[in-house]
Amino acid sequence: MVNAPVGGALHQYRIPAISILALAIALALPMQAQAAGTRAGSTISNTASASYDAGGGTQTIDSNKVDLRVDELLDVTVDSSDPADVPTTPGATAQLLTFSVTNNGNGEESFALSTIANGGGDDYDPTVTQIYIDNGDGVFDANTDTLYTPGANDPTLDPDKSVTIFVLSTTPGGVGDGNRGTVSLVAAAKTGTGAPGTSFAGQGDGGGDAVVGSTGADGQDQGAYVVSAATVSLVKSAVIVDPFGGSEPVPGATITYTIVATVAGSGAVNGLAITDNIPADTSYIASSITLGGTGLTDAADADAGDYNGTRVNVALGTVAGGQTRTVTFRTKID
Amino acid sequence: MRLFFLAFAAAILPGQALAANQVALDNNVFVERVSTDATGKQRVLLEEPKVVVPGDRLVFVLNYRNASAQPADKFVITNPLPAAVRFADAGDTRPFVSIDGGKTWGLLPEMTVRQADGTVRAAQPGDVTHIRWAFQKPIPAGGTGKLMFRGVVK
C-alpha cells in the first residue's frame, strides 16, 4: 500500500474500502469500559467541509449532514460496601449489610432490587427482613432512610449516579461460632435485562430504543456475615484443710472452693456472673472472696464480689473468648 | 437496513446537488458490528446506523468528486469531530489533526498536551477535535476519491 505524503493524500489515492487488515487491528484494540457516556436521546451530527480553488478563487462547500440518535444503554453494577465480613451473633436481628448500586448506562433508569440469601458457598442462610434506600448520608437510620417496597419505590438513577442500599437480616439462632452467611443484592434495570445487545424498541430514555449493555442490565454483589459467638464453661473444685493439718472433712475444717470460668470462641459474653450458694452445714468465712487472686469485700459495692448471707456472687461483666476468670471463697464446716 | 460487507468501494454514491461549484463532498457514517459465526470466526459488518449506543465504533467515510471541467487545486477537507465521538484512527490516510478546536494543526504523533499540573504528555487520539486532509496535487476534472476515519461513541 502506498503511503500518502505527510499530511495529505494523493488525489488518485484510493482507500481500498476498509482493509481487512486495518479492521483486524482495530478490533484487537481493547474496548474501553464506558462510563455513562453520551446521554441517551442526544444526536450526533457530522458534517465535513471542503475548500478548493478551481480557478475562480477559493470556494467552500459543506457535505451532507449525517445525524445519529444515541440510544439508551442499560448497565448497572452493584458493589458490597462492607470492607470485611460483618460480625453477627446467633439470633441477632437487624444485622446490616451495605451495598452501592450504580447506573453505568447513559439514561435515567429505575432499578428493581432483590436479595439472594440461599446462594450457597456459606454455612447458613441469613433471613433478609428489610431493604432500605439511603437518604444520601451513607449511614443507616430506619427513621430517615426509605424502606424499599419492590415496584413501589424502585430507585431511579441518573447516568453515573449511585445510591447506597442497606440490607437488614436476622441471624438464625442455631448458628455456630465462625459460621458465614452471605446475602447478594441484585439490581435489575426496570426497562429490561438480557443478553448484551438485546433491544427494547421505543423504551429508551429520550425516546429511542433501550439496548442492554455489557452488564446484562443487571448486577449483583455479595455481602457476608460471620458469626462471632462465645461459650462459657465453669469448673469448680474444693480443697479441705482440717484443724489437725490433714484434709478430712471434719467440723472446723476449712473448704476452699475454686471456680474457673473459661470463655471460648471468637465472640464475647456480656454480663457474666458467677453465683454460688453456701452449702448447708458450712459457714462462709468473711472476706474470703478472691477474683484472679485479689481479695474482694463482702459488701455489694464498687468491687465485683459480694456475699448476701446465703450466696457468693462475682460479677465478671464482659469477657472475651479465650480468657478465663478464677474466683475463690472459703467456708468452714460447722 | 442496508448491510455493507467489506465491499462498498464500488458503490457510486450520489453527490451533493451541484450548484455553481462542481466539487461534491458526500458524507456517510457506518457502524462496525462484529458477529461470530458457527465456526467461531468473527466477521465485521458495516451497517448504516440510525441509532447508536456509547461504545459503538463508527466509520466516517467522505467521498469527493470533482465534476467540473477544471482541476480543483488547494483541495482541503475538514471534518470537525462531533462532541460525542472520540477519534480512534484514520486508517492509512494520515490526516492533520487539531486538538484545540481547529486553531493549530499537526500530525498526532508530534503533538503534545500541557496538563493542568504543568507537565506535558503526548497527544492521544481522544484529544483530537478536528481532522483535515490537505491535498498536495490538484484534483483533475472528473477525479474522485475517498477518505475515512474511525471514532467511538463516547
Image (spheres, rainbow, N blue to C red):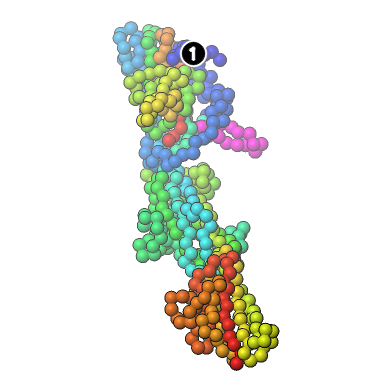
Residue that mark 1 sits on: A4
Identity of the residue drawn at 39% across and 62% down: A141
- Where A163 falls versus B9 (above or below)? below
Q: Is residue A170 left or right of residue A208?
A: right
Determine which quarter of the picture holds residue A325.
Answer: bottom right
**Which quadrant is the N terminus of chain A positioned in?**
top right
Residue with the most extreme front position: A244
Identity of the residue drawn at 56% across and 72% down: A293
Identity of the residue drawn at 49% across and 44% down: A213
- Where A173 falls versus A18 (above or below)? below
Determine which quarter of the picture holds residue B19.
Answer: top left
> Disc 1 is attached to a residue of which chain?
A
Q: Nearer the viewer, residue A262 or B55?
A: A262
Q: How many marks?
A: 1
Q: Which residues are magenta?
A: B30-44
Secondary structure predominantly adopted by residues drawn in magenta: strand
Name which residue type carries label 1: Ala
- Residue B9 screen position, x and y as percent: 51, 21
Q: Decide whether residue A103 is among the magenta residues.
A: no
Determine which quarter of the picture holds residue A23.
Answer: top right
Identity of the residue drawn at 66% across and 36% down: B39
Q: Nearer the viewer, residue A247 or A243?
A: A243
Q: Can you see residue A233?
A: yes
- Residue A322 screen position, x and y as percent: 59, 65
- Where A148 falls versus B79 (above or below)? below
Q: Is residue B32 left or right of residue A136?
A: right
